[in-house]
Image: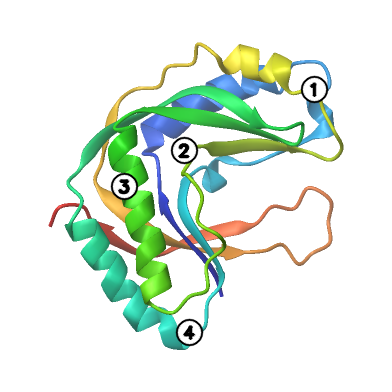
Amino acid sequence: MRLFAAVLPPPVAVDELAVAVDRLRALPGADELRWTGRPGWHYTLAFMGEVDEGLLPELRGRLARAAHRTPPFPLRIHGGGRFGRRALWAGAAGGLDQLRLLAERADAAARRAGIPMEEHRRYQAHLTLARGRTDTDLRPYVEELEHFEGTRWDVAELALVRSNLPRSGVQGDQPRYETFGSWPLGQ
């Protein structure tokens, strides 16, 4: 099964972001992008890819310890950016140091559970909003997101999410995400 550790924004934060994304989708050329849906909005902490079910008990225990060692912290969706000309994202503000630490702990938990992880790189907090099918000038979208300020919330849990890839072959079909486990922070 395909898994990743994540922070899931609360409904109020998702609703606020949806209003901003509706404005982005009205910009010229927006129909050339593949937009992610609300159910897919999350901050990935550690992408694990395909995980053998035999590793799940160890992974769950290690993620629980990572969550326990991390106290709750404030966060809000803030601004945006892009990865090259292919991915548009919303950023984060607030407890970024704590978010990076939680990401490092989730990555370490997966490695110690025996999951082969990609090369470790510095964590960049982002919530993917859209992907380009081809090289796309994403600057107008980033400029529109520049002043977005979401409501602050406290990150209170670490989630393990299962990614179910689309199998229909229908253009625009999106992955489905299901929370496969969650652990409260600081407890």
Q: Residues within 10 Å of mark 2 (few under 14, many from 20)?
A: many
Q: Amino acid at mark 2?
A: Ala
User: Quick check: 47 left or right of 60?
Assistant: right
Looking at the image, is mark 2 or mark 1 earlier in the sequence? 2
Query: Splitting the image into 4 quarters, where does residue 84 fall?
Result: top right
CA separation, marks 2 and 3?
11 Å
In whole angstroms, how far apart are the C-alphas of marks 4 and 2? 28 Å
Quadrant where the C terminus is found in the figure: bottom left
N-terminal-most mark, 3 or 4: 4
State which quarter of the image contains the N terminus. bottom right
Query: Can you name the residue that lies furthest to the left here?
Result: 187
Quick one: label 4 or label 2, which is nearer the N terminus? 4
- Amino acid under label 1? Asp
Q: Residue tagged by mark 1?
A: 137
Q: Earlier in the sequence, mark 3 or mark 1?
A: 3
Q: Tell which tag, 1 or 4, sits nearer the viewer.
A: 1
Q: Is residue 6 above or below residue 56?
A: above
Q: Which mark is residue 125?
A: 2
> Can you identify the residue that label 4 sits on?
53
Residue at image mark 3 = 101
